[in-house]
Image: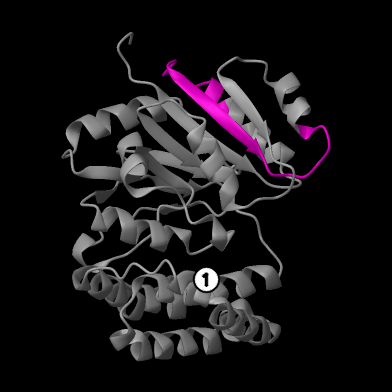
Amino acid sequence: MVNQPLISLVVVTAPGRQRDLWRCLRSILNSDCRNWETVVVDNSGEPGFDQKITKAFPDKRIKVIKMPFNSGLLGFNVGIVNTKGKYIMIIDDDSAVYRETLAKVIKLFNQLPKSVGVVSAAVYDRVLKRYTDNSGVDLSKTFRSFSGSGIFKRKVFAMVGYFEDKFFCWNFEEDFTIRFLQAGWQQYFASKKELLLDHYYKSHHFRKEQVFLITRNKVWLNVKHFSWLIMPLIFIRDMIWILLQPFRRKNWRALIYASLGYLTGILTAPGFIKNRHVAPWWIQKLYLQAQIGEDFKRLVLRKA
């Protein structure tokens, strides 16, 4: 279709993920939609890996940006800044698109209200043989993330800004959701029939860095966006979350790293107090409903 708007894909690749990245890029090249560009941000820290990508995928629509170190979320922001598309898809390097995915993105945005700035795709896990489809969720009572499956209108970043790269990783979805809701944008959760991506599950051993960063970033998120009046309630929620970590992650050390992360967050919180932007009460209420209600149940019953 000649008049298709340009779709930009941003893929940030981590260390040791060549096989995943190759599969992801091949799926994009096989797309029915031809009017796309892909920005691959090399966060691997491996010397010459950017050149290896370019050699394996010489298509001019694929641009590679080399980061000097694993920069986390900064890699996504650098990738987004270097795109030109009307729509920007953030896709994990261990995911893949179907042939019709990009065309469906355009069709879906054309059908949705103009206030929808973010679409979260459904995901099929090829290893676990299961779908993650949030389309039936009551959007008035949820605060789900778009991680690994988000497609954004360029206008959203122009109004809201980029991901909070100080977080490095994790919890940035909640921070960005608060900001785009406050700016008047809405999020739409697509069904598996409307928009689907593949994901390839990896069974991870206990990751102390992940536990530490998630709990540290919880404090930063709280300080950045929430009223001091409800902070005691949020603190209680966080303490329960921390106490559950050894059971959910099946490792007693999770309690240690979660506690250290939370303490570090408190000690470094002044950096976020300076740039504090308290969200409107309706957004704070929405977040608490999700965290203490639906998402907390998911934490207890399914996973951390």
Residue 207 visible? The answer is no
In the picture provided, is 212 more to the left or to the right than 149?
Answer: right
Q: Which residue is mark 1?
A: 271
Residue at the (33%, 32%) spot, across then down = 105
Q: Position of residue 12 (x, y in %)?
A: 60, 42
Which region is colored magenta? 27-49
**Residue 154 found in image quarter:** top left
Quarter of image, res 248: bottom right
Residue 44 colored in magenta in the image:
yes
Question: In this orientation, which residue lies closer to the viewer: 300 or 81?
Answer: 81
SS of the residue at dot 1?
A: helix
On screen, residue 71 versus residue 112, left or right, reads: right
Residue plotted at (28% across, 66% down): 142
Query: Residue 78 or 151: which is nearer the viewer?
Result: 78
- Residue 82 located within the stretch drawn in magenta: no
Q: Toward the viewer: 286 or 142? A: 286
**Color theme of the render:** one colour
Q: Local crowd at mark 1 within 10 Å, few (<14), some, or many (≥20)?
A: few
**In the rendered image, the vertical position of residue 96 relative to residue 71, given as above or below:** above
Residue 25, relative to residue 246: is it above or below? above
At 40% from the left edge and 62% from the top edge, which residue is drawn? 175
Could you tell whether 274 is left or right of 42 in the image? left
Looking at the image, which residue sits at the far right?
47
The image quadrant of residue 226 is bottom left
Dot 1 amino acid type: Gly
Identify the residue at horizontal 36%, vertical 32% (top origin): 87
In the image, residue 59 above or below residue 181: above
Q: Give how far across and how far down residue 98 sits, in percent.
A: 46, 31
User: Is residue 224 visible from the viewing direction of this image?
Assistant: yes
The N terminus, quarter of image? top left
Residue 176 % position (x, y) = 39, 56
